[in-house]
Image (cartoon, rainbow, N blue to C red):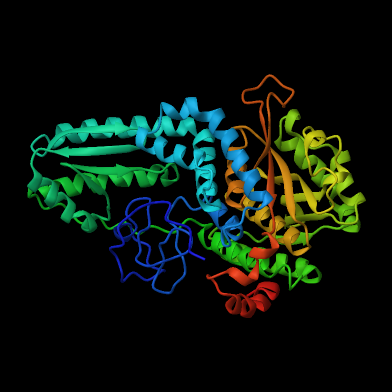
Amino acid sequence: MPPPSRLIHAEDAVTEVAPARWDRRYSFGPFLALNGTGYLLDCTSRSGKPLLGFNASPLFGTAHHMGSWSTGQRSDEDRRLKTALLELANRCQANLANRLDPRRLEQLSQVINQTDASAAQVSRTYITLSVLDQYTDQLDQVAGRIRSELQRLETEFADLLAGYQVEGLQFELQFQEERQLERFHLGRFEVGLDFDLTGQAARFEWVLAGGRPALDLLWQQLERLLQATRGDSPAMIETPVDPPPSLEQNYHFTEQMLAARSLAGDHPIPETANQATVAYLQSSLEHRADGLDLQPVILDADSYTDYRDQVLSLQTDIYEPARQTSAEEFDAIFQSAHPVALLLLAEGRIAGMGLAGPIDQFPQVRGMATDPFRADPGTLYMVDVTVREEFRGGLGKLIKQAITLLAQQRGFRAIHGRNRDRLARGMWSINLSLGSFELQHLVDDYPDQGEFRDCLYYRCPLEWPAATRANDLSWPDRETMLTQLPGIINGP
């Protein structure tokens, strides 16, 4: 099974960087271009552990669709994902046509219209379009910043630059002489940059997840490199950067889910699901830089009664009425035989929570009447994920990951849920990272007068087709997964 092809193209030029050494000189702006053949972005460290740059979260969705492309067969999930891609592309094409380079649009359209596109291609394209659709305002803001900074550089380095071109987040610096461009290109690694050459220009492409600090640093890097190209002696940029706090958490979770999915058919582990989930939460919490002392609790019908009042008050404290979950829905979770719910407690007070229950417990939910899985006992409905304001900063993702892991290990096949268009885009990015896609797009679903009333009614598959589980994986191999399984269950 070949790994998915690279999502972000960068030269594999650095070969001697240890995984723990995070420095902008080796991370090329928002990209990571460490040499190797990895399995998510084709970028790995010398230890063989895959590393992502600063656009990590949504791209993990590709790994979760991994199983169905390993045999070349088309599963029902493949077809649903392709349908979701076609509907999304039709919905957002007008907005994106004004924001993306025509070449990029052409690349996307080729996958959208390709009848035999692999699940990997469809997954990457769906994730790309969905993020762009949800973050068009940020796209416009960053594009405006890029244009203004290029105008400044053109004026400051008029002796080198003949002009620039910019479309969306792609831009080119055009040089007056070819030898100037050659010097500029040769010095790129000294300031931690990498880029392509086209004609007599250097071409760059930014990503939204780079963030403002990384974008600020990019202009410093470009300015220093232009100074060096001109013959000046700029100071070396030494900017150590801590990895995003969720990076190790993302990998830890994805590795566990890949192992669990691949072994699901032969090695069911529902009896240890609670233990493995608590171990995952504790391990992730221990590695957080903020030092939060939080206690994980897996809820059942008995323990729910102890926390019911807190659960209900947390909803009314945080959400507007149209997005509040009713007491009846929370109670319905624990009226079933198979609740999937957890809390993170800070001195007995709920800091964050995630609760799901069998989908047939929620016939009143908008969108349920047209959900083809509404009676499927193997499908959960995600009732709520909420984090108290003072504890926000990655806990929502951790809770959603833990709920996904818990549900998968208990034998559920999928999780369904609802996200409000744009207003819940942070949670939608998390759902994308778990392999979710829209099952239905409900127009004007939220009964209020606010902006963005559409609902993204999604499906998050928790298993691969049986033929693509453990027998056809190349990274990690089956033997490696089997040796890792005790640690996955019991924690570090």
**Looking at the picture, does residue 59 appear above or below residue 12?**
above
Indicate left or right for 173 with 392 as reference.
left
**Looking at the picture, does residue 387 appear above or below residue 245?**
above
Return the x and y of residue 133 as percentages of the image width and height.
52, 33
Return the x and y of residue 11 as percentages of the image width and height.
30, 58
Q: Quadrant of residue 291?
A: bottom right
Quarter containing the C terminus: bottom right
Return the x and y of residue 296 as percentages of the image width and height.
73, 61
Indicate left or right for 410 with 282 as reference.
right
Indicate left or right for 199 with 395 as reference.
left
Q: Nearer the viewer, residue 113 or 470?
A: 113
Q: Residue at x 76, y 29 (%)?
A: 321
Return the x and y of residue 355 as percentages of the image width and height.
77, 50
Whether residue 392 is visible: no
Q: Nearer the viewer, residue 44 or 464?
A: 464
Q: Quadrant of residue 404?
A: bottom right
Q: Residue at x 52, y 53 (%)?
A: 120
Q: Residue at x 69, y 59 (%)?
A: 463
Q: Nearer the viewer, residue 269 or 20?
A: 269
The number of numbered discs placed on residues in the rendered structure image is 0
